[in-house]
Image (spheres, rainbow, N blue to C red):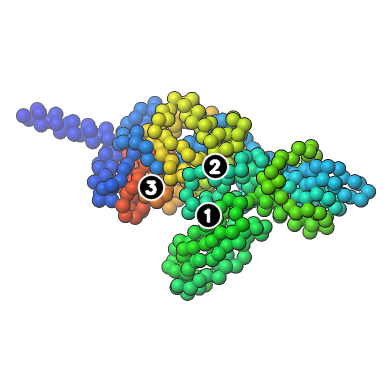
C-alpha cells in the first residue's frame, strides 16, 4: 500500500510538473463567469512545435483581433517586408503651352495605400498634397478644361466586408477599404459636451471635404465614451447616437470617411484652385463615372507608402483594422488579380494550406477579425506561430511587430507583473464577450514557448477574464 501510495503521489507530482498551467486554468474554468463560456488553449514548444498542453484547442471560437496574426504572416511571407504602395498623380489630354490650358483631366491613380496622409507616418506624408499641387503648377497649367478624377479602381468598390456589423462601419475602427484611402479613412467630429442629460453641440468636422452631414442624437452622460456613428460607405448622411462624457472641454468622436476617393479629389481640386488654377468641372471618381480612364496618363508625381514592415509594425502594435483589410485585398490583387475580400481570403487560406496547417474549422471572413462570424482555433493559430518561427523568411520582422507585455501597444496596460518583462510578445483580441491572446513566451527556465488562448461567452467584466489569463500565462512562465 505504501508503494502504491508513493506511485500515486509521484504520478500527481509528474502531472503537476508536466502541466503547471493546469491549476490556474482549472480555477478559471470553474469560475461562475465561465458557466456558459468556452476556452480554447494551446501551448507548444517553440523549438519543435510539440503540443505541450491542450484545452479544447481544436474548438472554433470567435477570436477578434488575433486574426491579424494570420493576415500579417501571409502578407510578410507573400509580399515581402519591402513591399510598398504607390499613389500617382498625372494628367490626360494635352497642355496648350501658350494659354496654359490643360485640355484633359488631373488624375489621382490609387495604388491601395492604406496609410496615405496618416498621422502615424508624418515624415512620409508631410504636405504630400501640397507637393502634388507644386508639381502641377510647374507644368505651367493655368486652366483645366476637365476636372480632378480620383481613380479608385485598384480595389473593388465594396469597401466593407459583407459580414461586418452595422454598428461598426460608421465608426473609425470599421472604416472600409478603397483604392484610394486617405487620413486612415477617419473623420474627427468635435463636440462641446454640456451638463448631464443635455445634448452636446456639434462643432467642426476634420478634415473638410467629406460631403456628409450627421443628425446629432447624442446625450452628455457619465464619464465614458459610448457614442456611435451610423453611416454606410458612399453615403451622404448619417446619425450619431449614444452618450459622450460630461465635460467642459472639446470632445472628439471619430467616424469613418464614407467616400475617401471623392474626398481626395475634392481636396486636391480645392488646393489647385487656391493656387490660382481654374477647373471647369466638379471633382469626381472612377466609381461615379462608371467607366475606366482609357486615355493614357502622363505621370506628374508619385507618393510612396512606408514599407510593409513599417505598416505591419503599426498594424499589430495598435491593432489597426483598416491596414489589415488593405493587406487582405492587396494579397487578392497581387496573387489573384482581384482586389477583393474574397480574393484575399482565398490567398490566405492557400497560404495556411501550404504550411500544412489544417484549416478545417477556421472560418476567415476578413483580415482584421472585426467580423463576428470569424472563428478560428488555438491549435491552428499556435501552429502558424510555430511555422513562422521555424521557416518564416521574415520572422524577426513578424516577432518585432508584436507588442511587448506591459510595455507597448495593446499590451501596455496589462501583464504588468515583472514575470512578463522581456518574456512575452503577443497579439491581443477583444470584442463583446471575446478575449484572446496569442504569441511567444520565454519561460523562467529559458524554454521558448508558443501559446494561443481564446475565451468566448464569459459573464461579468472583461478585466476579470484578463486577470485569469494573466495567471495562466504567469504559471506557464514560472514552471515550464
For marks 1 and 2, the one nearer the N-term is 1
280 sits to left or right of 14 = right
Label drawn at residue 434: 3
Is residue 417 visible to us here? no
- Give the alpha-carbon distance from disc 3 to disc 1, as whole Å: 20 Å
Answer above or below: position of 430 versus 49. Answer: below
- Give the alpha-carbon distance from disc 3 to disc 2, as whole Å: 20 Å
Answer above or below: position of 168 versus 44. Answer: below
x, y (%) of residue 303? 71, 43
> Which residue is found at the position 49% from the left and 31% from the top?
349
Q: Which residue is mark 1?
A: 171
x, y (%) of residue 435? 38, 47
Tag 2 secondary structure: helix
Tag 1 secondary structure: loop
83 sits to left or right of 268 = left
Q: Which residue is mark 2?
A: 325
> Which residue is found at the position 56% from the left and 52% from the top?
232
Indicate the quadrant where residue 305 lies.
Answer: top right
For marks 3 and 1, the one nearer the N-term is 1
Amino acid at each position: 500500500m505504501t508503494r502504491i501510495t508513493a506511485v500515486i503521489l509521484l504520478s500527481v507530482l509528474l502531472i503537476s510538473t508536466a502541466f503547471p498551467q493546469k491549476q490556474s486554468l482549472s480555477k478559471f474554468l470553474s469560475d461562475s463567469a465561465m458557466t456558459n463560456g468556452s476556452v480554447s488553449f494551446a501551448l507548444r514548444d517553440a523549438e519543435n512545435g510539440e503540443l505541450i498542453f491542450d484545452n479544447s484547442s481544436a474548438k472554433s471560437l470567435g477570436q477578434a483581433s488575433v486574426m491579424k496574426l494570420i493576415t500579417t504572416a501571409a502578407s510578410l511571407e507573400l509580399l515581402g517586408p519591402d513591399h510598398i504602395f504607390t499613389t500617382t498623380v498625372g494628367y490626360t489630354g494635352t497642355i496648350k503651352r501658350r494659354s496654359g490650358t490643360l485640355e484633359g483631366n488631373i488624375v489621382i491613380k490609387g495604388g491601395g495605400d492604406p496609410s496615405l496622409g496618416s498621422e502615424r507616418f508624418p515624415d512620409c506624408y508631410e504636405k504630400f498634397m501640397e507637393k502634388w499641387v507644386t508639381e502641377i503648377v510647374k507644368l505651367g497649367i493655368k486652366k483645366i478644361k476637365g476636372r480632378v478624377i480620383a481613380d479608385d479602381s485598384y480595389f473593388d468598390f465594396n469597401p466593407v466586408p459583407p459580414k461586418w456589423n452595422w454598428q461598426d462601419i460608421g465608426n473609425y475602427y470599421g472604416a472600409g477599404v478603397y483604392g484610394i484611402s486617405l487620413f486612415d479613412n477617419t473623420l474627427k467630429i468635435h463636440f462641446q459636451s454640456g451638463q448631464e442629460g443635455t445634448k452636446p453641440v456639434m462643432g467642426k468636422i476634420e478634415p473638410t471635404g467629406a460631403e456628409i452631414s450627421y443628425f446629432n442624437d447624442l446625450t452628455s452622460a457619465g464619464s465614458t465614451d459610448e457614442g456611435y456613428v451610423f453611416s454606410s460607405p458612399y453615403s451622404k448622411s448619417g446619425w450619431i447616437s449614444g452618450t459622450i462624457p460630461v465635460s467642459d472641454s472639446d470632445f472628439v468622436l471619430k467616424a469613418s470617411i464614407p467616400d475617401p476617393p471623392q474626398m481626395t479629389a475634392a481636396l486636391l481640386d480645392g488646393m489647385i484652385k487656391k493656387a490660382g488654377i481654374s477647373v471647369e468641372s466638379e471633382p469626381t471618381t472612377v466609381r461615379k463615372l462608371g467607366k475606366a480612364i482609357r486615355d493614357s496618363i502622363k505621370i506628374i508625381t508619385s507618393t510612396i507608402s512606408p514599407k510593409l514592415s513599417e505598416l505591419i509594425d503599426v498594424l499589430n502594435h495598435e491593432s489597426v483594422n483598416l491596414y489589415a483589410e488593405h493587406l487582405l485585398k492587396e494579397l487578392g490583387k497581387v496573387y489573384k488579380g482581384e482586389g477583393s475580400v474574397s480574393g484575399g481570403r482565398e490567398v490566405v487560406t492557400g497560404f495556411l494550406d501550404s504550411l500544412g496547417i489544417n484549416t478545417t474549422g477556421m472560418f476567415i471572413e476578413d483580415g482584421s477579425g472585426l467580423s463576428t462570424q470569424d472563428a478560428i482555433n488555438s491549435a491552428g493559430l499556435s501552429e502558424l506561430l510555430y511555422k513562422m518561427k521555424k521557416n518564416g523568411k521574415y520572422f524577426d520582422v513578424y516577432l518585432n511587430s508584436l507588442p511587448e507585455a506591459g510595455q507597448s501597444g495593446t499590451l501596455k496596460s496589462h501583464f504588468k507583473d515583472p514575470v512578463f518583462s522581456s518574456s512575452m510578445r503577443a497579439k491581443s483580441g477583444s470584442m463583446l464577450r471575446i478575449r484572446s491572446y496569442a504569441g511567444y513566451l520565454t519561460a523562467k527556465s529559458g524554454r521558448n514557448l508558443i501559446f494561443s488562448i481564446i475565451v468566448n461567452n464569459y459573464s461579468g467584466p472583461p478585466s476579470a477574464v484578463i486577470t485569469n489569463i494573466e495567471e495562466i500565462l504567469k504559471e506557464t512562465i514560472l514552471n515550464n
